[in-house]
Image (cartoon, helix red, strand yellow):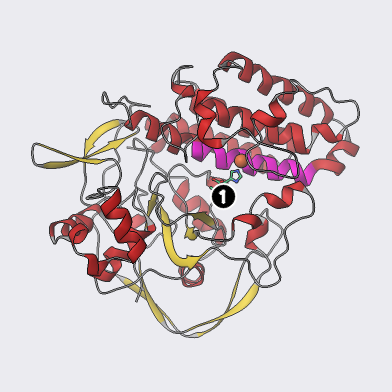
């Protein structure tokens, strides 16, 4: 079924991208903020308060924190701005020590005031203040760069809203539905691989478009020849791993991975459960049978790594991924529009029609073998905003590509997502290399 017929979310986001292409900062601001409203419109105040685990945040916290970012890094720099509420600096600061102390993350779900109405009012207040100031070219000149970071930040939190509400709903034995959607027909998979010759390659962002600081500086790397799968590993392939005792064979696992399997009793991807001898998975559209042709999703780095060892392969490094992506994708623009314009949002994850024919970005984030580190010569930006990415460059792995929950405008071959090796609640899968 055509996307336009089935998916309000895609339509809204396409509209948003058209606005963004229009390039005026206030239009972009308007559409990104409205998209946050759109994806939270069906949630009740109770839904928005749940914090199902330490890593996830209540939706209401995300709504406030995205707003706090604009208030803190833009509006408060203006002498004539009056803060909405003096407590919010502490309550909705995520991790910026240069701004001040933060309310402890694990307890975010214990805070019932301000109420959701008040948080929505806070959003409207900051929107009004920012939009009216954006009329002034001086204000734009002073803050355009930070506002653009703020919009990309808000979009990262849109994805986190979806992953976090999915975790919250999954923790409810009634397995409630976020939004009921039709499921995309799945594509068959072929066993096809691309060969990339050895050589020196440039990696990292270049050009005028937006990127995060961790995509810089562009630099040259040497890669030995490698092969990389054109397909994401599928649920069907992962079931073979499970049936072959994958979760019971320590020799397949890294030591820390095996500890996680034992301590947390992992025996399948997150959100999978057996019903009447069949594998089912919880999605944002509720419980649904596992489709063997869909990309595997909600696995940790440890599971991706163990599967690769079982298959006699390995995970690609982040630079192998980037170089392969670039050489297999004609132009970046084509990669972005060709794949993601046809995105079908299916209950929390989707299949791109082009996925099995070599589309590289995929509909799930892809774990790489690379630990998240600074590129040579990397410098975080000065000031508190320098805490955005750089200080997390320890004990995490890089994921590449993008997921069904990722903003389309974030899809680029240099984007570096990152999570700890045991994280499973993001839309994370993988492809193999050798
Ligand atoms: C890039 C997704 C790991 O979740 O903290 C949000 C995104 N950075 N606010 C995260 C982010 C600041 C970040 N990830
Ligand atoms: Fe944030």
Q: Specify the quadrant that holds the N terminus.
A: top left
Where residue 157 appears, x then y in whole percent? Answer: 56, 38
Horizontally, residue 350 falls left or right of residue 272, namely: right
Which residue is drawn at the image coordinates 77% and 29% (left, top)?
130
Magenta stretch: includes residue 145: yes
Q: Position of residue 350 (x, y in %)?
A: 36, 43
The magenta stretch is 144-160
Q: Which residue is mark 1?
A: 410
Q: Position of residue 87 (x, y in %)?
A: 71, 23
Secondary structure mostly seen in the magenta stretch: helix
Q: Is residue 382 above or below residue 330?
A: above
Q: Quadrant of the C terminus?
A: bottom left
* Tally of numbered tags: 1
Q: Residue at x 33, y 31 (%)?
A: 171
Q: Is residue 290 left or right of residue 10?
A: left
Does residue 7 show up magenta in the picture?
A: no
Whether residue 232 is visible: no
The front one of 398 and 330 is 398
Q: Where is residue 339 shown, x and y percent of the image?
A: 44, 52
């Amino acid at each position: 079924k055509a996307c336009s017929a089935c998916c309000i979310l895609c339509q809204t986001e396409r509209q948003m991208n058209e606005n963004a292409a229009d390039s005026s900062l206030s239009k972009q601001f308007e559409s990104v903020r409205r998209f946050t409203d759109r994806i939270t419109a069906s949630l009740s105040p109770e839904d928005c308060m749940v914090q199902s685990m330490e890593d996830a945040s209540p939706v209401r916290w995300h709504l406030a924190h995205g707003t706090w970012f604009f208030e803190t890094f833009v509006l408060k720099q203006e002498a004539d701005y009056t803060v909405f509420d003096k407590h919010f600096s502490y309550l909705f600061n995520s991790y910026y020590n240069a701004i001040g102390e933060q309310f402890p993350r694990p307890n975010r779900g214990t805070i019932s005031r301000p109420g959701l109405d008040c948080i929505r009012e806070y959003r409207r207040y900051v929107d009004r203040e920012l939009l009216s100031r954006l009329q002034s070219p001086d204000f734009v000149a002073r803050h355009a760069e930070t506002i653009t970071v703020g919009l990309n930040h808000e979009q990262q939190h849109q994805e986190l809203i979806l992953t976090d509400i999915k975790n919250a709903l999954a923790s409810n034995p009634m397995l409630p539905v976020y939004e009921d959607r039709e499921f995309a027909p799945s594509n068959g998979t072929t066993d096809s691989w691309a060969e990339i010759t050895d050589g020196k390659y440039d990696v990292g962002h270049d050009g005028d478009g937006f990127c995060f600081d961790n995509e810089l500086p562009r630099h040259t790397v040497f890669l030995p020849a490698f092969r990389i799968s054109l397909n994401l590993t599928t649920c069907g392939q992962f079931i073979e791993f499970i049936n072959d005792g994958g979760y019971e064979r320590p020799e397949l696992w890294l030591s820390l991975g095996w500890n996680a399997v034992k301590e947390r009793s992992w025996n399948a991807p997150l959100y999978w459960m057996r019903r009447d001898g069949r594998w089912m998975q919880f999605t944002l559209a509720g419980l649904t049978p596992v489709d063997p042709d869909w990309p595997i999703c909600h696995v940790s780095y440890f599971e991706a790594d163990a599967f690769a060892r079982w298959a006699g392969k390995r995970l690609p490094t982040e630079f192998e991924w980037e170089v392969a992506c670039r050489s297999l994708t004609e132009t970046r623009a084509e990669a972005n529009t060709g794949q993601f314009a046809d995105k079908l949002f299916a209950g929390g994850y989707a299949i791109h029609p082009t996925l099995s024919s070599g589309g590289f970005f995929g509909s799930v984030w892809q774990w790489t073998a690379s630990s998240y580190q600074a590129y040579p010569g990397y410098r975080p930006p000065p000031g508190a905003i320098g805490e955005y990415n750089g200080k997390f460059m320890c004990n995490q792995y890089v994921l590449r590509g993008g997921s069904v929950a990722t903003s389309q405008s974030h899809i680029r071959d240099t984007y570096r997502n990152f999570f700890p090796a045991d994280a499973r609640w993001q839309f994370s899968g993988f492809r193999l290399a050798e």
